Each structure stands twice: as C-alpha cells, then as structure tokens.
Image (cartoon, helix red, strand yellow):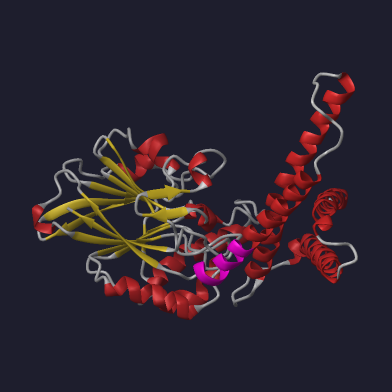
C-alpha cells in the first residue's frame, strides 16, 4: 500500500512539475510576481501532498462521527486544486503534441512546412490560455462552494398521470433526495429546507434516499429538524446506495455493519418517515386511491442491487395509478419502464445533477448526461414518467455550480 501511495505522490508531482514548467514563463523570472507565484504554487502543492499522506495513513483509524467537522471543506479544496490543474494542463499538452508532430515532419521530411522555429507568440498564447483556464475553473468552483452549497431552489413541475382521480386533481407531492448529512454542517440551513417544504403545504412528502454518506449517526444532529416536516397524507422514504455503509470496507456479514443498518432503519422511524423496504402502501383519500411503492437501492453497473421490484409490487392493485420511489434513475430503463404491472411515475435522485452544469429554462446540460440517460428533471416515455431530483446535499465537493440543491414541488393531475 505504501508503494502505491509513493507512486501516486510521485505521479502527481510529475504532473505538477510539468504544469509549473509550462506556465511559470508567463511571468518574468526576475519579477516579484514570479517569485510569489512560485512560492505559492509549491507551498500549496506540498500541503496537499501532506494531507493526502495523512488521510491515507489514518483512514483505517477513523471512527463514525456524530458532530460537525470540516473534512468536506478540506477535501473540496483539494479537489478544486486538482481539477483546476487538470484543465490548465490541456493547452500545454496540445502544445507539446504539436511540437512532436512538427519535429517528426522535419526529421522525416514529411512536410515542406517552414520549421525555422516555433512561433514565440503561439507559445505565449498557449501558456496564458493554460493559466487562464486553470484560474477560471478554480474561481468558479470556489464560488460554487460559497454561493451554491446551500442555495436551495423550489422547482415546480406538473405531471399528468392516466386515470388520476379528478377528486384529487392538483395533488401536491414534495420530493427531496440525497441529504448526505455527513457533509452538511448547519442545522440552521436544514431548518431553512424544512421551512421551504412546509410553506408549500404538501399533501405527500417523499425522501428518495442517501440520508447519510456512510454511518447512521451522521443523521443524529438533524433528527429534531427533520421531524418538523409536515405533510397531510404522510411522509415516506427509501434508502440510497450510501445508506448501506458499503463504502467504508465493512462486510455485510459483520456485526458492526448489521448494527449500523439496524440503526439506519430506526432513525428513519424516529424522524417520522415511513421507510419502504420493497413495500407498497395504498393511499386512499376519500375513495380516491393510488399506490405508493418503495424499493431498496437498485442501480445499474457496479451499484448494489438490493431492491426487489417484484416483491415491492406484489400487493399492488393494477387498477390504480402507481408512484414508485427508487433512488437510482438507471432502474427505470433497466426494470421499471417495461415492468409487468403499471408504474406511472418513478421518483429518483442519486445523480446530484453532478453538482455542475446548466439548468435554466430551455437549457439543461451537464457532463453527467453522458453517464445517465435520465439525469435531472422530468422524462416521459409511453405515458410513463421519471423525475430525477438534483438532491439537497453534496458529496466530495461541498458546492454546486449551475445545478442548485433542489426541493421538487410535483403537482399531479
């Protein structure tokens, strides 16, 4: 393990040195700004190397935490620095590839291109472009931490479901997802979320998974706040992939895993959520009926597949509309849309909208669209719907750029 750590540190040092060599000529070497830049560049890099080594050596010694901490801020700043350097490398790599091709053309006389020398202005342009790209990305992500992390947005969506009773037309469902309370560090901010939810006077409230990052006790400081959520016809929840404590290396057969999972289920009950573990509920409102179904996490690829849709749908009356709570939107394409019983609407989360992209009227984009077909918002196919919530919390990066934390206000008719 130490050998792998040493190789990783050496590798990122080489990348750092390559980037540094490429951009430092932008400043005059005798200039004071150059000396300040050099000092800051290597001081920050050295501190990051030290943090990586410390985290690596002490990861196994860490215990589940209850109280707030700033680990997410530190890891986010490290992520921002690495990502900014990565984007800064792109023009320099392009520059060096062009150099190689020019050299090969000259050596093998493939081209009659004038190779009297590489244009200084071009080198200068690429160096400045590299510095500009890295700086812009760094400042953008830094702003996302300051202004996007807790910038909660209400998103109103109308959904028309076949055979929905006219007696409950305009039925209001509030959905939130992906709280990731281990990265949250403000009860006051969560109080704001609860206030925004209650101001909408929801008929039904649903939470679609990832209450915590790993451990059940990450949620303990927030239980009393979450208890304050009110909904006329109930509050329901499901589990997400992070709620199973699978990312800390515990075997599911171990005692500590079983205790954590048992407490995870108990904390949903303490909050007042009706946790659906491959179960269904028939919601009857003065004779107007629909099915509410919740499955354990099921995700395509390497994500755990604990959910059993057949089991969850076993008692469902197919004569009534069905709303499914399933954390991972990949479940929709893989199993839900062609399921033998009718499922009119799936409510999902999981993606966070990547916490980076564009979400304005008429434009919805994120690099995540290349990973998930349904990654944010409402999708429809054959009169069946899936709605993917952007989540309230965050993971790895304590911020959001363009894709804000979301409270979905779904009006069903």
Is residue 304 left or right of 309 when viewed as pictured? right
The question of residue 140 being in magenta is answered with yes
* Residue 18 appears in the picture as rendered: yes
Task: Determine whether, in the image, residue 410 is placed left or right of residue 39.
Answer: left
Residue found at x 54% / y 38%: 301
Tell me how many marks there are: 0
Front residue of 4/43: it is 43
Q: Which residues are magenta?
A: 139-149
Give me the residue at 14% from left, 45% from top: 163
Decide if residue 217 is in sight here. no
Nearer to us in this view, 221 or 26: 26
Residue 399 x, y percent position in the rendering: 55, 65
Location of residue 203 in the rendering, given as x and y in whole percent from the top left corner: 22, 65
Question: What percent of the width, then of the height, locates residue 308?
Answer: 41, 42
Return the x and y of residue 110 as percentages of the image width and height: 81, 18
Residue 317: say if magenta: no
Q: Is residue 24 left or right of residue 185?
A: right
The residue lying at 82 percent from left, 54 percent from top is 16
Residue 390 occupies which quadrant of the picture?
A: bottom left
Type of secondary structure dominating the magenta stretch = helix
Q: Vertically, is 315 above or below 392?
A: above
């Amino acid at each position: 393990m130490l050998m792998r750590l040493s190789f990783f540190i050496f590798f990122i040092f080489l990348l750092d040195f390559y980037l540094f060599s490429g951009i430092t000529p932008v400043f005059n070497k005798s200039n004071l700004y150059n000396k300040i830049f050099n000092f800051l560049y290597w001081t920050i890099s050295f501190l990051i190397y030290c943090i990586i080594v410390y985290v690596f050596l002490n990861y196994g010694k860490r215990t589940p935490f209850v109280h707030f901490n700033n680990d997410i801020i530190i890891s986010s700043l490290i992520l921002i620095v690495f990502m900014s350097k990565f984007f800064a490398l792109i023009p320099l790599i392009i520059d060096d590839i062009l150099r190689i091709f020019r050299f090969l053309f000259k050596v093998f006389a493939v081209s009659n291109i004038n190779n009297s020398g590489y244009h200084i202005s071009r080198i200068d342009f690429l160096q400045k472009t590299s510095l500009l790209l890295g700086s812009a990305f760094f400042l953008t992500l830094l702003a996302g931490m300051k202004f996007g992390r807790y910038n909660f947005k209400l998103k109103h969506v109308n959904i028309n479901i076949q055979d929905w009773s006219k007696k409950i037309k305009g039925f209001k469902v509030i959905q939130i997802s992906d709280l990731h309370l281990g990265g949250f560090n403000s009860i006051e901010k969560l109080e704001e979320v609860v206030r925004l939810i209650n101001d909408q006077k929801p008929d039904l409230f649903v939470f679609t998974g990832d209450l915590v990052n790993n451990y059940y006790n990450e949620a303990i400081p927030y239980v009393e706040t979450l208890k304050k959520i009110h909904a006329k016809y109930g509050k329901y929840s499901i589990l997400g992939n992070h709620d199973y404590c699978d990312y800390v290396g515990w075997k599911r057969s171990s005692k500590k895993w079983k205790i954590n999972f048992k407490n995870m289920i108990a904390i949903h009950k303490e909050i007042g959520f009706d946790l659906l573990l491959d179960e269904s509920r028939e919601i009857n409102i003065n004779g107007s009926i629909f099915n509410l179904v919740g499955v354990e996490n099921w995700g395509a690829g390497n994500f755990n597949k604990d959910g059993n849709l057949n089991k969850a749908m076993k008692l469902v009356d197919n004569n009534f509309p069905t709303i499914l709570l399933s954390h991972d939107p990949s479940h929709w394409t893989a199993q839900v849309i062609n399921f033998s019983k009718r499922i009119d609407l799936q409510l999902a989360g999981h993606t966070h909208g990547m916490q980076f992209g564009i979400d304005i009227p008429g434009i919805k984009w994120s690099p995540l669209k290349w990973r998930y077909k349904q990654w944010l918002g409402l999708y429809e196919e054959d009169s069946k719907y899936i709605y993917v919530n952007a989540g309230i919390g965050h993971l790895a990066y304590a911020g959001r750029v363009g894709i804000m934390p979301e409270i979905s206000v779904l009006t069903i008719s």
